[in-house]
Amino acid sequence: MTSLSRTTSARGLPGRPTRPTRRVRPRVMSRVLGVGLLVGALTGCAAIPSSGPVERRDVTISELGPIFPQSYGPTSGASPQEIVQGFLSAQAVGINDDWATAREFLSPRGGAAWDPSARTFVYSGEPDFTEPAVEAPDPGDGAADDPAGDAPSGDDLSGVGASTSDNTSDPATSDPATTDPAEPTTVSILGHVSIVATLETDGQFTEAAQGNTQSLTFTLEKSSSDQWRITATEDGIFVSEPNFALVYRATTLYFPSQDRSFLVPDVRWYSKSNTASHAINGLLAGPATWLRDSVEVVAPAGTRLVLDSVTIDDSGVARVDLTKEVLAASDSDRAMLQAQMTAVLLKVPRVRSVELFANSLPLSIPTTADPQRDPVPGLTSPLVLAGDVISEVGNGTLTPLAGFSALTGLRASALATDDAARLVVLRSGTVAIMTAPTPAAAATTLVTGTDLVAPSVDRFGWVWTGDRATNDGLRAVTAAGTQVPIPVDWLDGRTLESIRVSHDGARIAIVSSLGGVSRIDVAAIVRDDSDVPASLSVQALAIGASVTAATQVVWIDESTVGVLARGLSSGIPTVYEVPISGRSAALSGVEDTVWISAGKGLRSVYVANSDGALFSRAATGSTWSQVVGGVQFPAFPG
C-alpha cells in the first residue's frame, strides 16, 4: 500500500510524469493540497519603549483566536489522485465554509449526491490507496459526460496506473496536444484509512476500536475540458487527527439531575468557530438519547435562539437571546436554565458572564438555582484495609477509621463508602455485601449472591452490586435492607466485571466481558420521585473501545473514568484515562497492580499491587510514588 496524503505548500503543479506504473505513487502536491495555518485575533501587541521614566500601566492581552487549517480548490490539470487528496484535505475546513471548497473537487452530479453532514470519520496516519480501476470509453460511445463543466484543460492520468483502450487515430490528422486515445475518462480509486473515532451530527464522539478501518471509494470522470472531478463517493467527511484537534473542541453541555441538585454533563464536540452558538443550540435540542431519562429539561418546548447565534462582547458577556417560548418557563425553571447556560458558556473561551433575553428583552429571573457540579469527594485520600482494620491514609501513615470495628473473620475482598464515610460496606468473599461492624452493631448482610462484583455506594445511600453472571441484572440495597432489582437487558449473556456510580448519582459506569473481550459502558440511572433507582437506560453509551481486557472502573471526574486493564503493548496491568467523549490514554503502569481508586483528578488516582503497596500520582502528577505498604482495596466515596 502506498500513501497519497503528503502535502506541501507549493502552488505550482509538478512536471508531467512518465507513464503510470502498477501502483499509485505519492507525488509532490500542489496548492490543491496546500495546508496552511490561519491565526485569528492577534491583537494587543505594543512596542517596548527604550527611553523615558519607568511607568506602571494596565495592559490588556487579547486571547488568541482558533487556528484553522487552510485548503485550496483544485488546480487546472490536477490528476485523479490530486483531486482525491485535495478533496480529503478540504473536508477539514468544510464545517466553517459549508464545504464550499470541498465541493469544487466534485462534479455537479457528485456534489448534489454527497452529504457531508452524515458523519465525521477521524483517522490516523495517511490514507492508503490500492491500484485504481480504470475504464476507457468505447469507440462508439462518443464523448464522455462533462462532470466538471467549463473547468480549464490540463493534466492527464499519469501516475494512476491507467490501462489503454483499443482506440487509434491517424497521426497525420490527430493533434497530439488535444487527442490521446490512450487516456481513460473514468477512474475508480479505492483505499482505506485507520479510523480512531466517529463524530455524529449532534456532536457525539465515539472512540473506535483498535484496528478499525474504513474503505474509501472515489469515482472520477474527465470532462470535455480535460478536468478530473469526483462523481461519486461515500457520504460523510474524513478528517485527520491533527486537523480534528485544530477544528473541533470538546464542549460540555449540562442538564439538571432529576432532583435538580446536580448538573449532569453531556459532552459534545463542536467547531471552534461559533462554539457558544453550537453549545446553546445543542442544549436546547436536549440531552443525548442514553441520558434523557435521568435528567431534567427545563427549557420549554420550541425554545430556540432568536438569530441562531450567541454574541460575546469585548468584555466577555455572552448574550443569549431566546424566542418567546421561554416565557412559558416557571421561575424555578428560568433559574435552572440560567444555571445551565452559565455552566456551559463559562467553559467557552472569552466568556466571562452570561445574560439571558427573551425576544431581545431581558428575561426576568426572580429566583436563583445553585446546583452542584463535579464536587470534590469528602475524603482527600482513600480508605484502605490494613490487616483487618479499615484505615485512612494520610502523609504516609495509617489511622484506623473512627467509629468502625475490625473486620476479623469477615473475609473482606472489597470496600465502598459514602461521601462522609458514615456508611462503609464490604464484600465478604464473593458471596455477600455487608455493612462494616461498629462498636454498637455487628456486620449486617445486605445482599447475597454466587459471585458478586465489588459494591458501589451512591449519594442517596443505595449500595449497588450484581452477580458476575448478569442475566439477573443489578441490585441496589439500602443500609436498612430495602432491596430493588435493576433489570439491564443489554447485559444479558455477558460477564459483569465492575460497576461504579457517578458522584451525581445519575450515571453508572459498567465493565463487562464476553468471550474474554471487555466493554466499557456508561448508562443513565432512572429513579422514581423518592430517588429510588428503578432501571438503567435502555441504551448505554459505549466508551473506551480501544481499551481491552478491562477489569475495574472508577470515576476520575464528572466526564472521565479510570479503567484498570492489561496494557496493549506491555501486557502489564495499566490504568487508562477514558473520557466519556474522547480518546483513551494509558498512564504509566505499576507492576502487579490489582486495584484502583480515584477521588477527583488524575493526581487523586491510587493503585494497590499484589504485595500490598499503595501508589499515588499526587506528588508529580505523572509518575507513581509509593504512599504506604501492607494495605488492600483502596476506596474513595462512590
Image: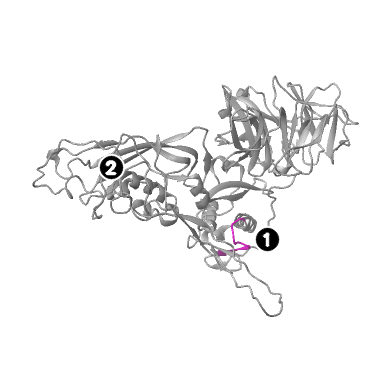
Report which quarter residue 618 is drawn in.
top right
Residue 154 lies left or right of residue 486; in this view the side is left
In the image, 114 versus 211, the foreground residue is 211
Residue 79 lies left or right of residue 554; in this view the side is left
x, y percentage for residue 211? Answer: 49, 32
Residue 452 lies left or right of residue 211; in this view the side is right
Question: Is residue 454 in view from this perspective?
Answer: no
Report which quarter residue 612 is drawn in.
top right
The C terminus sits in image quarter? top right
Residue 18 has which mark? 2
Outermost residue to the top: 450
Magenta-colored span:
347-357
Q: Return the residue at label 1.
A: 367
The N terminus sits in image quarter? top left
Q: Which residue corresponds to the image point at 69% horizontal and 26% vertical from the top-left?
A: 453
Whether residue 506 is in magenta: the answer is no
Whether residue 351 is in magenta: the answer is yes
Q: Secondary structure at mark 2?
A: loop
